[in-house]
Amino acid sequence: MADVARLAGVSISTVSYALSGVRPVSEATRDRVQWAIEQLDYQPNVMARGLAGRRTGFLALLLPTDESPADPFMIDIIVSAAEAARERGYHLLLWTEPAGESAGVKDLMRRGLIDGALLLSVRLDEDRVSALREADVPLTLIGRTEDPVDSQFVDSDAEQAAEVAIAHLAELGHRTVAYIGPPRSAYEDGIGIVIRIHDSLVRSAERHSVRLITAYAERNVAASTQTVTDLMSSEPDVTAVLALDDSAIAGVLDGLRSIDQSVPSDVSIIGLLVSPQVAELAWPKVTTVSHDPRDLGRLAALAMIDSLNGASSRTAQVLLPSELAERSTTAPPPAARL
Amino acid sequence: MADVARLAGVSISTVSYALSGVRPVSEATRDRVQWAIEQLDYQPNVMARGLAGRRTGFLALLLPTDESPADPFMIDIIVSAAEAARERGYHLLLWTEPAGESAGVKDLMRRGLIDGALLLSVRLDEDRVSALREADVPLTLIGRTEDPVDSQFVDSDAEQAAEVAIAHLAELGHRTVAYIGPPRSAYEDGIGIVIRIHDSLVRSAERHSVRLITAYAERNVAASTQTVTDLMSSEPDVTAVLALDDSAIAGVLDGLRSIDQSVPSDVSIIGLLVSPQVAELAWPKVTTVSHDPRDLGRLAALAMIDSLNGASSRTAQVLLPSELAERSTTAPPPAARL
DNA sequence: TTGTAGGCGTTATCAT
DNA sequence: ATGATAACGCCTACAA
């Protein structure tokens, strides 16, 4: 930077201001500085900036290690967050930590490394959130706590997604619908989206006079295959199945195939909050009620950056609405069972 | 740090040396410093370190954005790299960039941000590698270029994996084996592991007098389902199928099921370089020839850090051997077709 | 074994 | 609108 100043014939501070724009610089000198910068192919030093200024340009993405292995939906979140951060000149740090912990991130903050943190898979009851807030770590949740009034978050609108899914099935004429959800442990762990989806489905089903049968399957194909075949034999009235998880979808398709139920003429399937890739890769292509998972990561990163820059006075709280994407797994129920 | 020095009754530099261990410090003072550190719950400032020292403690993980969406195998690599880095006190930066580009990483280096970079999905012919090497960016490849003599890398031993897989099938008595590989575009793009696996399979098949039929399927279930059914009708002698990709495996299982070929009594299946999760999640559980994908990320990160610390004089070149994990998809071929 | 002091490359606070 | 010049918090010769 000293070199640039010398070449441009100005002081170091002028170069700095020309770069940051924090104080007015005459057009002429700005141009000369710009020219010198290009001449020397100068790149500002990140560490020096972090030391001198009050912002480092780093965000931590906190992802729990001991939870279910990351699925495509989550990958999309992570990568899109990294891309959005990068667009804004920020850097995304991948920070792995056991589910409940937050000490590591607190340290990152105290070491002057990060400006803020994005939290993935937020539970309804989050110790991390309160702990980090006390430590003055700017936070953006991907997901929500039970009562997120004063926290910044980006989350899927579970209520709306459930309503769209149930409404679509009800319109088609389905009266008995099964929901293959995550294992009970996910409920006990308080994973927000899992609980909200379930509760919302129950409410929507009531509203539409649909009978909803909930089943719990481990997150693997074999388990959900088993679950769905058991279910179909004990509940023969079921004409449609909702599935939340990628593996659940695969399992449901497999299970129905194994008992010679054809999709969608015998049984309809809707995938909830499933990434489009997964839906397109399955056979037949799965009708979904979902939104682009990339929005979750992207908006979370942008919200964080905006709030760091003091752009918005209020904390951003975004609920992403889902859309019905009709593919090849939904149809009216077979006449015989109407 | 000044506070710590004061509390411990020593100079700032003594604290620094006590921390880094670069020069001897008497036990007594070290203890006092340690005590003061704990009293004040002191954490060294990362930016200041990066500025003053010659190491920043950051590694970039470069992942191409425009390639096929990340699969579980790749996720494992990424997360394990982050964990390994963290264990050693390093931080992993997620850096997304279009496949061929390397300008971004070069800038990261010139801005004094990173100490080195890990490159994911390395192609046989890599412009990035030579470009970054010229820019003096310490590099560790996850994968290999065509002629990796002087570069540091961690890669799967394709030759060995192919041999293990073919040998196992040959031993079981299979004489005609199909290989459902990635689409031709992956070969044209020069993805190292894809090409090496294929070439190695061809060689191993020859060695074991096995007829190998190669097919190319897009990375989705529908395509590989189609591919495998077509294949089985045009090549009825096939009694075993090798598959490289997760989606290929699902497709192969689906396809065989759809034409009433039972696995493994009619047709055997082996998954190559598939993450154990995926193999266990499928039904029936897929026999694999693979290694833990986490080793790739972990060893790459550790190799990078070691070489930065000048630990090893020679550049690390690791080829990870695969192991046969017999699950439920391999058996001798049906007698009729022997 | 320990202390002193200069420097790392910016930002920010004074002046001018 | 622009220049000097302290911090920023740590590392590392150089001295003692």
Image: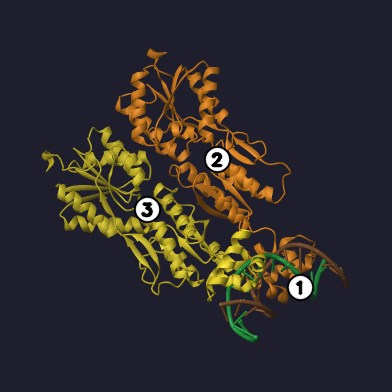
Chain colours: A orange, B yellow, C brown, D green
Q: Name which residue type carries label 3.
A: Pro
Q: Nearer the viewer, mark 1 or mark 3?
A: 3
Q: Amino acid at mark 1?
A: Ser
Dot 3 falls on which chain? B
| Figure check: C16 above or below A294 | below
What residue lies at 31% left-to-right and 59% top-to-bottom? Answer: B196
- Nearer to us of marks 3 and 2 is 2
Tell me the element at label 3: helix
Viewer-proximal residue among A226 and A109: A109
Residue A331 placement: quadrant? top left
Q: Quadrant of the C terminus of chain A?
A: top left
State the residue position of label 1.
A11
User: Residue A139: x and y, percent?
Assistant: 62, 46
Cα gap from disc 2 to disc 1, whole angstroms: 48 Å
Split into 4 quadrants, where in the image is the N terminus of chain A?
A: bottom right
**A328 is higher (above) or lower (below) than B44:** above
Q: Which residue lies under the disc numbered 2?
A: A122
Distance between the alpha carbons at the discs numbered 3 and 2:
27 Å
* Residue at disc 2, secondary structure: loop
Residue A90 is at least partly visible in this image: no
State left or right for residue A106 relative to residue A179: right
What x and y, as percent, mark residue A264?
39, 25
Residue A33 in which image quadrant: bottom right
**Residue B293, disc:** 3
